[in-house]
Image (spheres, helix red, strand yellow):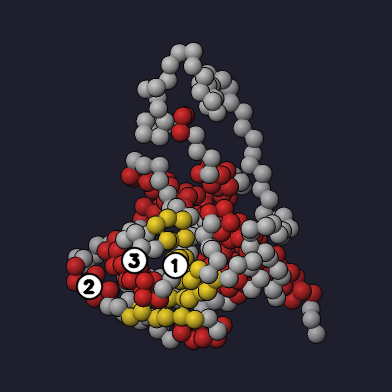
Amino acid sequence: MITEQYKKQTYNLNKLQKRLRRNVGNAIADFNMIENDDKVMVCLSGGKDSYTLLDILLNLRLNAPIHFDIVAVNLDQKQPGFPEHILPQYLASIGVDYKIVQENTYGIVKEKIPAGKTTCSLCSRLRRGILYRTATELGATKIALGHHRDDMLATLFLNMFYGGKLKSMPPKLISDDGKQIVIRPLAYCKEKDIEKYAIAKQFPIIPCNLCGSQPNLQRQVVKDMLNTWDRQYPGRLETMFSAMQDIVPSHLCDATLFDFKGIKKGVVINGIEGDLAFDKEEFSAVSLNDENEDFELEGKIAFREVI
C-alpha cells in the first residue's frame, strides 16, 4: 500500500531532481560543455557532489538531443581506511563504465609535507596530473568535476580576501596541460539542493577526512559566512552569483580590460554608461525561478521525468 508520506517523498524527490536537471542542462547549454560524440570523464570522489553529478548526467543522457558517452573515474590514493569496495560496487550496480586508478599519492604527500601541515595543495596537484593522464588514456574529450555554485562563490571571496584577485572557478576551461577541457556542469546548482538529493538517493558517501589533513580553514570561514548570509538574507547568494555573470569592466579598475587612458572629453562610448557615482542607486532583487517547470528548447538538453 502506497502511503501519503511515500507519495509526498516521491513528489519532493522528483521536484528536486527536476530542478537539478534544469540547472545542469542550462549550464551545459550556456557554456557548450558537452557536444555530440563527446566522451565525458566524470571524476568521482565518493562525496555528495560527484555522486549527484554522475547521476544527473546519466539521467540527462537518456533523452539528450546529442550522443555522448560517460565514464566514471575514481582515484584510489591509498589513504588508510579507504573503503575501496564501495565505488566499484555502486558503479557496477548502476551499469556505468568506470575505471579505478590506484596511485599512492598519500604516501608521497606524507613524505613531502611535515606532520600537522595542510597537505591539500600538493595532493591536489598530484591528483590533477593523474586525472589528466587518465583522461588521455581513456580518450575522454571532457573532464567533469563536481564543483557547484557555492564552491564558485566561496572561491571568488577567497581570491578577493587572500589573493587580491577577482577570480573564481570557471564553468569551462582548458586543463593545465592544455590537452583537456574541464567542465563543471553543477555550476548553477545550490549545495543545499545537492545535499538533499544525495540523502534522498542514499548515495554511499565516503568520508573526505581519511587523509588526516587539517581542513582549509580559510575556505571554511568563507563558507560559514556565505551560509550565514543565505539564512539571514534569502536570495543574496543568487544575487552574488548573478553578478559573476554580469561583469562591467568600465566600472572596475583593471586597465587591461578597459581603455581608461583612451577616454576623451565629449566622446560617447557606445554601450558604456556614464559615471553614476553621485546618484542614489536603486537595486531590485534578482528574480528567483527555481520552481519553474522544465522546458525544451532547440540546442538545450531535453528533460523527462524519471522515477
Say whether marks 1 and 2 touch (CB < 8 Å). Answer: no
* Image-quadrant location for residue 191: bottom right
Front tag of 3 and 1: 1
Identify the amino acid type marked 1: Thr
Identify the amino acid type marked 3: Arg
* Image-quadrant location for residue 111: bottom left
**246 with respect to 212 (left or right):** right
Identified at 68% across, 50% down, the residue is: 289
**Judging from the image, what secondary structure is the residue with disc 2 in?**
helix
Residue 164, horizontal then vertical, whole percent: 34, 41
In the rendered image, which quarter contains the C terminus? bottom right
Say which residue label 3 marks. Answer: 128
Q: Crowding near pointer 2: few (<14 within 10 Å), some, many (20+)?
A: some
Say which residue label 2 marks. Answer: 108
Q: Crowding near pointer 3: few (<14 within 10 Å), some, many (20+)?
A: some
Name the residue nearer the viewer: 280 or 64: 64
Q: Earlier in the sequence, mark 3 or mark 1?
A: 3
